[in-house]
Image (tube, rainbow, N blue to C red):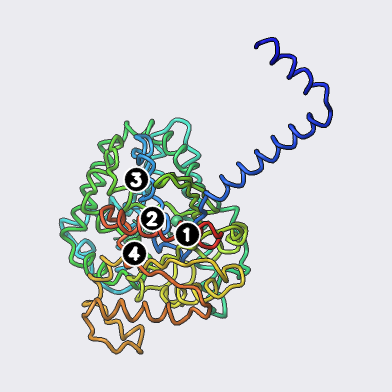
Amino acid sequence: MGCAASTMESEEDFNPLLQDKKMNDLIEQQIQLRRQNEKQLFKLLLLGAGESGKSTVLKQLRLLHQGGFSQPERVQYAQVIWVDLIQSMKILIIQARKFGVPLDCDKANNPLTPYKQLVLRIDPLQQIETDSAGGSNFLSEFVIKYSEGYKQKRKVNTGSASTAQGWDMNLADDDSNKLTIEGIATELQEVSKFQNGGIQDRFKVAEAIKKLWEEDSGIRRTFARANEFQMETNVKYYFENVNNFADPNYICTDTDILKGRIKTTGITESNFDINSFKFRVLDAGGQRSERKKWIHCFEGINAILFVVALSEYDQTLFEDERVNRMHESIILFDSLCNSKWFANTPFILFLNKIDLFQEKLPKSPLRRYFPDYQGSPNNVEEAVQFFTNIFLRSNRTNKPIYVHTTCATDTKSMKFVLAAVTDVIVQKSLQKSGLI
Ligand SMILES: Nc1nc2c(ncn2[C@@H]2O[C@H](COP(=O)(O)OP(=O)(O)O)[C@@H](O)[C@H]2O)c(=O)[nH]1
Ligand SMILES: [Mg+2]
């Protein structure tokens, strides 16, 4: 038998026609296999204005389908939050003065005065750097991020015209200000190494922030007007847990990471296996200067997940304080939904930050910002329906839009929402390619 087989093989070996056919079959098989694999890769693009919650959705996917965050990442996130936390208290003090809100800590001989002095004296970045022998690239990058970010904002704010901008606007690129999440992560690792020497100082700063947050009525009054200036979304959570973040060895919980923010620049790609389907999720920076990069990833997309922060109906853009954030989102959604690029691409709409919207609605009348709102002032459902209608009305194509009300920081509810979303993407994509 062995002998016969070897004779057959050698015949084939010497037959050029059979050789060609064999090679062709092999190539054809490989092409088929690649096509099949490509068909099974579902590409989801996350879009929406800056701070709407796109990266938080991605974090939930990581928690649910990729085993979550590593220990070094958890330590690094704590560092970013610590810097943001100090910066946020400084902003509150400075903003109180701009508003003319009297601060207890500004009064002569007030016990809070030394705490204020400590907070104002500290440069959150320098404070960490002075403990280091060699300094840190992370810190200089982080300083650039802050200073350039604010410079850019000032430049736009002092410009002449105020026009809301879609994805095809053409602002100056801010690549010089580019700071990737990976970059921050590596640099932060460096920082936490040399920070241990200053641990007592960090706890003093934490105590000062806690005192001002809890005891200065002017700080609270200013915070109540946070919609009138730029504040991190979950700063209240940072202040309430300030001691954790002061500890340079603190390891962030999942909640800390979901509530924390690192501004996304450029486009990140993440791959997930969800119910034996392969998903590629693209997360893009949402601020105006980032949007012209979006077009690079418009090809071959199976669905768009557009994220809107409901709670931002009374806030203005970081990059242009004359523009209402919700108005910007509506215009952005309109331009994407009706663009030729996505004529047949399913759209999923997340009306996000419902938790903050619920909290805010009774305090900040919706009609003040959207005079067309006819529902009752404190009725969350009616208010959500009002915005749902606005977004659905702007769709001038025949494609359906799948709407979900979400709290992207809540893993439990997001588990259900994301399961429904991935299901619909698979169904629609397979239908489109005629496979079901
Ligand atoms: N409370 C609350 N915070 C949220 C929610 N979604 C996002 N955030 C926070 O909003 C901030 C901006 O979110 P991020 O995902 O970075 O926005 P992106 O710019 O669209 O990627 C982060 O601090 C998040 O923790 C939400 O539903 N509720
Ligand atoms: Mg982001």
Callout 2: SS: helix
According to the picture, the residue beneath numbered tag 4 turns out to be: 94
Q: Name the foreground residue: 28 vs 239.
A: 28
Q: Earlier in the sequence, mark 2 or mark 1?
A: 1
Q: Earlier in the sequence, mark 3 or mark 4?
A: 3
Q: CA distance from mark 1 to mark 3?
A: 17 Å
Q: CA distance from mark 3 to mark 2?
A: 10 Å
According to the picture, the residue beneath numbered tag 1 turns out to be: 46
Labels 1 and 4 touching (C-beta < 8 A): no
Q: Is residue 309 visible?
A: yes
Badge 3: residue crowd in 10 Å (few <14, some 14–19, many ≥20): some
Q: Earlier in the sequence, mark 1 or mark 4?
A: 1
Badge 2: residue crowd in 10 Å (few <14, some 14–19, many ≥20): many
According to the picture, the residue beneath numbered tag 3 turns out to be: 63
- Judged by depth in the image, the label closer to the viewer, 1 or 4, is 1
Q: Residue at x 30, y 76 (%)?
A: 384
Q: Amino acid at mark 4?
A: Ile
Label 1 residue near ligand 1, CB within 8 Å:
yes
According to the picture, the residue beneath numbered tag 2 turns out to be: 57
Q: Position of residue 419 (x, y in %)?
A: 35, 55
User: Which corner quadrant of the image does residue 189 belong to?
Assistant: top left
Q: CA distance from mark 2 to mark 4?
A: 33 Å
Instruction: Tell me if residue 399 comes above or below residue 298 in the rendering.
Output: below
- Judged by depth in the image, the label closer to the viewer, 3 or 4, is 3
Q: Amino acid at mark 3?
A: Leu
Q: Position of residue 390 (x, y in %)?
A: 41, 81
Callout 4: SS: helix
Q: Amino acid at mark 2?
A: Val
